[in-house]
Image: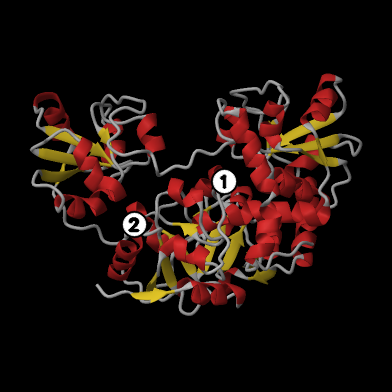
Amino acid sequence: MLIKKQDYAFVRNKLLKKEEIALLDVREEDPHAQEHPLFAANFPLSRIEVDAFSKLPRKDVPIVTLDDGEGYAQLAAERLSELGYLDVSVFEGGVKAWKAAGGEVFKDVNVPSKSFGEFVESKRHTPSLSAQEVKKLIDAKEDVVVVDVRRFDEYQTMSIPTGISVPGAELVLRVPELAPNPKTKIIVNCAGRTRSIIGTQSLINAGIPNEVNALRNGTIGWTLAGQELDKGQSRRFKEVSESTALEAAERARSVADRAGVKRIKLTDIEQWKSQAERTTYFFDTRTPEEYEAGHLPGFRSTPGGQLVQETEMVAPVRGARIVLADPSGVRANMPASWLAQMAWDVYVIDDLKTSDLTEKGAWVAPLPATPDIQTVDVKTAATWLQNDSTTIFVDLSTHANYVKGHIPGSWFALRSQFSKALEKLPKANRYVLTSTTGELALFAAQEIQGLTTAEVLVLSGGNKAWIDAGLEIEKGPIHLASPPLDRYKRPYEGTSVDPAAMQAYLDWEFGLVEQLGKDGTHHFWVL
């Protein structure tokens, strides 16, 4: 398939003019995290069919695919064209050509958000305390409340002693009742720096009367200071009174107005859903539990703190429009104030009532029509597993999900690396492909069949169907036919990270503001 080529000047010009562009790094997450342009969103070739319709909702958005010479960009461009996208190009020469043209490259993941956090601190001198200072306050039983602004699962893995889980967008709503005395000191922490800087500055911007400080360098700083972290804690924020909620709504609205957040009514967004001339993302920024209890049709669950932290993961089209929904107003207005400062065109729905939230349940990604592939039901597959040594099960889930639990004896393989994986897989007459819920395996089956003479089938319903049938699973990183390139090992995750890697990560974050200056395409500003 003939796909047009684009270069550095084309991409940079789009970014500088704030025009829509989806610069998609289609490598797996680990190679992406080694170096990439600032606004190159990670969009792995392996997952294109399951991600495209939700992340690229407008079919004629300008798309440029990027790799580092492996050939993935061409394949990704062809797949996107087959899915009906009309303006797809390949970045000629890959990351090497970007650098050769003078383009800045960045390490790690969620770099636009992390560099923005550093930018905020450099402009506002966001107050912070060292790990030793915070420990002293806690040990002396001072009047202090520690709030952890990460996702609840991250908080459970490791947390600061006495810390309470209050994910970022909830802060302005929940802190007034966690620290009703204005003399109580508030410490905001995350794993590293970004979310604690943004959380601390959110409370300051909203005019909370308490003294607020970030825990400098988060749980990394705590660990590097030789201090013990808690594990498995479950302290969470509570519901707040109506008067607290109303006051928080006023504070958040004031911040959003100062940041230039635009307002829209529910009736006015219907035409945007047709995605005629602009890409629009529709996000519900409350907790996942609230979302599942009732949400607006067509809105995706993206808790506000994580949306600010991981914007490009759900909104890879730079220059797009973002609409946020939360009946309380707080969880939409506070994230919107930050997105506006990150140069997004952001709107909050006004006058949203709980009665408008007519759809229930978890978010379901829109998918292309699944190809006509031969499938096998769980019962038959389980019989093959027991009695047929020439049938091999291959799991295309993420490495993290594979480790958590997979069909006994199955092998982990990345779709993008499958030709290499075949060299490690046991010889078989039949391969049964599976994935977390089965869709990814269905989309991958045809191309995998083209790589082998063995019969290729897909487990109907994937691993979920297997587990739902009450069948046994095994855990752990065994039978790896592909390296786990789909997940970059973050130096702030888990509890057994090398201190040198932690320090290197902090040093990298400190250098981001200088890199932003060299790149020059960000349009960030600070209230």
Q: Which residue is painted at 55% across and 25% down in the image?
A: 496
Q: Can I make out residue 130 in this image? A: yes
Give above or below for 350 relative to 46.
below
Q: What's the colour scheme? A: secondary structure
Q: Label 2, label 1: how many angstroms apart (C-alpha)?
A: 43 Å
Q: Position of residue 360 (x, y in %)?
A: 47, 50
Mark sitting on residue 70: 2
In this rendered view, identify the residue nearer to me: 507 or 348: 507
In the rendered structure, find residue 493 and report the number of the disc placed on it: none
Asked if 92 appears above or below 128 in the picture, the reply is below
Q: Is residue 461 left or right of residue 153?
A: left
View extreme (bottom): residue: 277
Residue 168 seen in the figure: no
Q: Amino acid at mark 1?
A: Glu
Look at the picture and state if 39 lies above or below 30. below
Q: State the image coordinates of residue 271 (x, y, percent, origin top left).
A: 50, 76
Q: Amino acid at mark 2?
A: Glu
Residue at horizontal 32 percent and vertical 72 percent from the top: 84
| Front in this rendered view, residue 466 or 105 | 105
Compared across the picture, whether 394 is left or right of 300 comes to left
**Residue where numbered disc 1 is placed:** 290
Q: Secondary structure at mark 2?
A: loop
Going 66% across and 33% down the picture, which residue do you hit? Answer: 220
Q: Residue at x 58, y 61 (%)?
A: 104
- Name the quarter where the C terminus is drawn: bottom right
